Image (cartoon, rainbow, N blue to C red):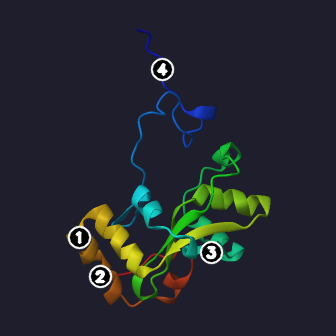
Amino acid sequence: MLHQKLRHQNNCIRCPILGSEDAAGEEWYQFLALRFDIRIARQLCRASMLHRVDAHDMHSWLEATQVERAHLDHLPLDLGPGVMVTLPSGCGRLIIDGNHRAARAIRDGREFLVYLLPEKETRLLLQRSMGYVAADHYWKRLTEATPHPDDLKPGGKPRG
């Protein structure tokens, strides 16, 4: 049996690995101590949650996150909306799925849509992603935190 060396499509570290299509991997988004399971997030999305993201806010968010600029041209145009979550107590919103799509949309002058999960669904997502004890611990800390004015900007990091 021949073993082919697996490599990333387009030799891009963000593109899927060739030959691994049948090995579905887990996809997570990590922000500070919060860990979001993208598969679960997509299951929680409903059509009524679809929103257009303001280009200025999206640009500010993307400045605070890691985006592989070389990967943008490898993205198909039909990947659909991203997923954004809402943290409690005005701590902000995070794009947990679709940062590269958002960057490409800004670059190309197109609008970008996200499913915006409200606080209730965001907490449920965290509970299902991290476990109830850990999720509730961090949720409580965020709820008790008094946001600094800079925290309210897109990409702001909660303090406390």
Distance (Cα) linking label 3 and label 4? 41 Å
Instruction: Examine the rendered structure and indicate whether residue 153 appears above or below residue 76.
Output: below
Q: Of 129 and 149, which appears nearest the observer?
A: 129
Residue 15 locus on image (x, y percent): 57, 40
Return the residue at label 4.
5
The quarter of the image holding the C terminus is bottom left
Distance (Cα) linking label 2 and label 4? 46 Å
Distance (Cα) linking label 1 and label 3? 28 Å
Distance (Cα) linking label 2 and label 1? 14 Å
Distance (Cα) linking label 2 and label 3? 28 Å
Q: Which of marks 1 and 4 precedes in the sequence? A: 4
SS label for mark 1: helix
Relative horizontal placement of residue 45, taking residue 124 as reference (left or right): right
Residue 86 locus on image (x, y percent): 47, 78
SS label for mark 4: loop
Which residue is drawn at the image coordinates 44% and 67% (left, top)? Answer: 44
Return the residue at label 3.
51
SS label for mark 2: helix
The quarter of the image holding the N terminus is top left
Instruction: Examine the rendered structure and indicate whether residue 60 appears above or below residue 159.
Output: above
Return the residue at label 2.
141
Amino acid type, mark 4:
Lys
Which residue is drawn at the image coordinates 52% and 84% (left, top)? Answer: 152
Which residue is drawn at the image coordinates 44% and 33% (left, top)? Answer: 22
Query: Which residue is situated farthest in the right direction here?
Result: 109
Q: Residues within 10 Å of mark 2 (few under 14, many from 20)?
A: some
Return the residue at label 1.
132
